[in-house]
Image (spheres, helix red, strand yellow):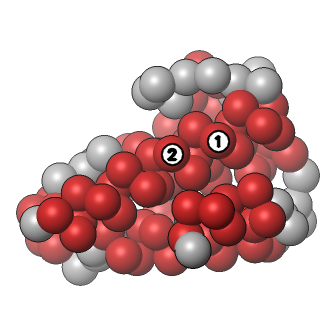
């Protein structure tokens, strides 16, 4: 229980830190409105709907397809995706074959792909 709470807070702070440092966005609850591009906003909303439907693995796979060719907007989309996923309860995640550690690992993978993992190493050490 405490470990899962710790991981949840860790993920939240990693996302907030990256949004602030890379995009100058300071938000307690990041959402799709932070995306300037309508297409990116629609893509994120589609991914979030998939999460709500319990299709988490499928949504994450689609996210990885989207970020295959990295650009700043896609990083922001990925950060918002994992922020939203992180807000789901442990029970919801488990019901849909996912867990908090997978959220953290997915976020770390995306951060590494974009080469900005140095900003968040402080959280994981």
Q: Nearer the viewer, residue 31 or 37?
A: 31
**Where does the image place residue 73, in percent across and percent down from the top left?**
80, 42
Q: Which residue is mark 2?
A: 13
C-beta proximity under 8 Å, tags 1 and 2: yes
On the picture, is 19 further left or further right than 82? right
Q: Compared to 89, does 16 lie above or below?
A: above
Residue 29's mark? Answer: none
Q: How packed is label 2: few (under 14 Cα within 10 Å), some, or many (20 or more)? A: some
Mark 1–mark 2 Cα distance, whole angstroms, equals 6 Å
Question: Which image quadrant: the C terminus?
Answer: bottom right
Q: How packed is label 1: few (under 14 Cα within 10 Å), some, or many (20 or more)? A: some
On the picture, is 52 further left or further right than 37? left
The image shows a total of numbered marks equal to 2
Q: Nearer the viewer, residue 113 or 37?
A: 113
Question: Which image quadrant: the N terminus?
Answer: bottom left
**Where does the image place residue 7, in percent across and percent down from the top left?**
35, 63
Q: Compared to 40, does 56 lie above or below?
A: below
**Where does the image place residue 105, in percent across and percent down from the top left?**
51, 76
Q: Residue at x 31, y 69 (%)?
A: 100
Q: Which secondary structure lies at badge 2? A: helix
**Where does the image place residue 93, in percent across and percent down from the top left?**
22, 65
Residue 99 falls in which quadrant of the image?
Answer: bottom left
Q: Which secondary structure lies at badge 1? A: helix
Q: Residue at x 55, y 70 (%)?
A: 124
Q: Confirm whether residue 42 shows in the render.
A: no
On the picture, is 49 further left or further right than 108? left
Q: Residue at x 46, y 25 (%)?
A: 28
Q: Which residue is mark 1?
A: 17
């Amino acid at each position: 229980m405490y470990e899962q709470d710790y991981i949840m807070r860790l993920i939240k702070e990693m996302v907030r830190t990256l949004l602030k440092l890379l995009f100058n966005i300071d938000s307690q609850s990041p959402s799709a409105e932070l995306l300037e591009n309508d297409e990116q906003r629609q893509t994120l909303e589609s991914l979030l709907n998939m999460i709500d439907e319990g299709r988490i693995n499928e949504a994450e796979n689609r996210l990885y397809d989207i970020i295959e060719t990295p650009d700043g907007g896609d990083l922001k989309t990925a950060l918002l995706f994992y922020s939203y996923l992180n807000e789901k309860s442990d029970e919801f995640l488990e019901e849909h074959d996912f867990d908090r550690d997978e959220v953290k690992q997915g976020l770390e993978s995306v951060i590494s792909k974009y080469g900005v993992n140095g900003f968040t190493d402080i959280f994981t050490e």
